[in-house]
Image (cartoon, helix red, strand yellow):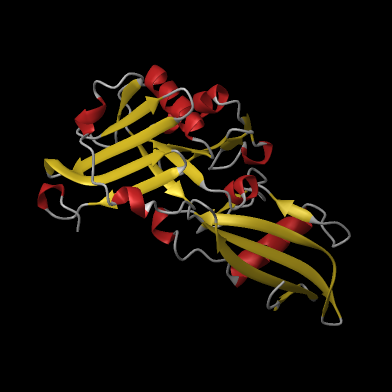
């Protein structure tokens, strides 16, 4: 459980610990556990809570402090907690802290484990529910009253961001392609972007050079979707046995200059950035 700190509340001793970890999307998760103590030793069942940073400026420094532990004890005792049973403080329970917001006990890592994932970020957070329905993802009940809603099913995990946008996480390119097609129907001008989590870079294919974004314009089964900026594009190239994804992002101050190329094909991922003029690799 880690190092236990002492907390005295109205002559009752409590022991608490705080730790943090990072979820698959890079979000810092703060886990607080508080136990009653007898003769200096932990006894009974704990109060537990998981938190996210309330503001984007605190994402990398989020932590539970002694005041947060004391507030959790006060809130739990007001709800009848005496250590005879465990208690999770969940979003919507009325527990508020200045720098932290409650999260759910499970999040993206619980759904995906260590499996390689593809992530489609969509700039319009209002599309989260519609995309989840399209991809047969059910809402997570414990997140319904929180600041961060999410849905999950066999195909995907849909996360509505607290600071804007919605992200669809999936294991297969076909499901990311389905999400892109849904965005195209619901909001054809909304920008999207792709990334990979836990994939090994395909160095052999990388050495073959960068295709032109226009190379897919005449390819049968290829559809074009808006990228993160007006000059950027995402191509979905469907074949009988696979779906290929190609994203071309250009420099915001030089629309003709390739800035990032992202490609997923046949189970291989390429991501390359071009910091030099003319799209030359740096």
Q: Which quadrant of the rendered structure holds the N terminus? A: bottom right
Q: Residue furthest right?
A: 84
**Residue at position x 57%, y 23% from top?**
133
- Picture layout, residue 153 above or below residue 220: below
Q: Using residue 48 as the reference point, say whether residue 201 is left or right of it.
A: left
- Picture layout, residue 170 above or below residue 183: below
Q: What percent of the width, then of the height, locates residue 58?
A: 43, 60
Is residue 123 visible in the rendered structure shown here? Answer: no
Is residue 145 visible in the rendered structure shown here? Answer: yes
Q: Using residue 140 as the reference point, say whether residue 156 is left or right of it.
A: left
- Picture layout, residue 240 above or below residue 141: above
Report the number of discs.
Answer: 0
Q: What percent of the width, then of the height, locates residue 203?
A: 35, 54
**Residue at position x 67%, y 51% from top?**
105
Q: What percent of the width, then of the height, locates residue 91?
A: 63, 45
Q: What percent of the width, then of the height, locates residue 66?
A: 61, 72
Based on the displayed image, in which of its 4 quarters is residue 56 positioned? bottom left
Q: 282 or 24: nearer the eye?
A: 282
Q: Which quadrant of the rendered structure holds the C terminus? A: bottom left
């Amino acid at each position: 459980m880690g190092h236990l700190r002492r907390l005295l509340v109205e002559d009752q001793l409590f022991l608490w610990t705080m730790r943090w970890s990072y979820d698959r999307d890079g979000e810092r998760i703060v886990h607080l556990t508080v136990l009653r103590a007898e003769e200096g030793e932990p006894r009974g069942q704990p109060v537990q809570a998981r938190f996210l940073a309330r503001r984007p400026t605190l994402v990398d420094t989020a932590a539970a402090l002694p005041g947060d532990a004391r507030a959790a004890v006060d809130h739990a005792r007001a709800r009848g907690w005496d250590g005879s049973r465990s208690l999770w403080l969940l979003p919507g329970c009325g527990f508020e802290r200045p720098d932290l917001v409650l999260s759910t006990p499970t999040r993206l890592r619980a759904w995906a484990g260590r499996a390689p994932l593809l992530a489609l970020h969509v700039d319009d957070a209002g599309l989260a529910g519609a995309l989840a329905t399209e991809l047969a993802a059910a809402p997570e009940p414990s997140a319904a009253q929180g600041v961060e809603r999410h849905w999950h099913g066999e195909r995907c995990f849909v996360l509505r961001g607290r600071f804007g946008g919605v992200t669809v996480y999936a294991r297969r390119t076909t499901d990311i392609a389905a999400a892109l097609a849904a965005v195209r129907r619901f909001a054809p001008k909304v920008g999207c972007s792709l990334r990979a989590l836990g994939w090994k870079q395909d160095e052999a294919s990388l050495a073959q050079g960068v295709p032109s974004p226009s190379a897919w314009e005449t390819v049968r089964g290829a559809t074009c979707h808006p990228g993160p900026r007006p000059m950027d594009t995402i191509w979905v190239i469907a074949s009988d046995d696979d779906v290929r994804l190609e994203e071309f992002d250009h420099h915001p101050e030089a629309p003709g200059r390739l800035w990032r190329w992202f490609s997923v094909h046949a189970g291989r991922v390429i991501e390359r950035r071009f910091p030099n003029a003319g799209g030359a690799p740096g």
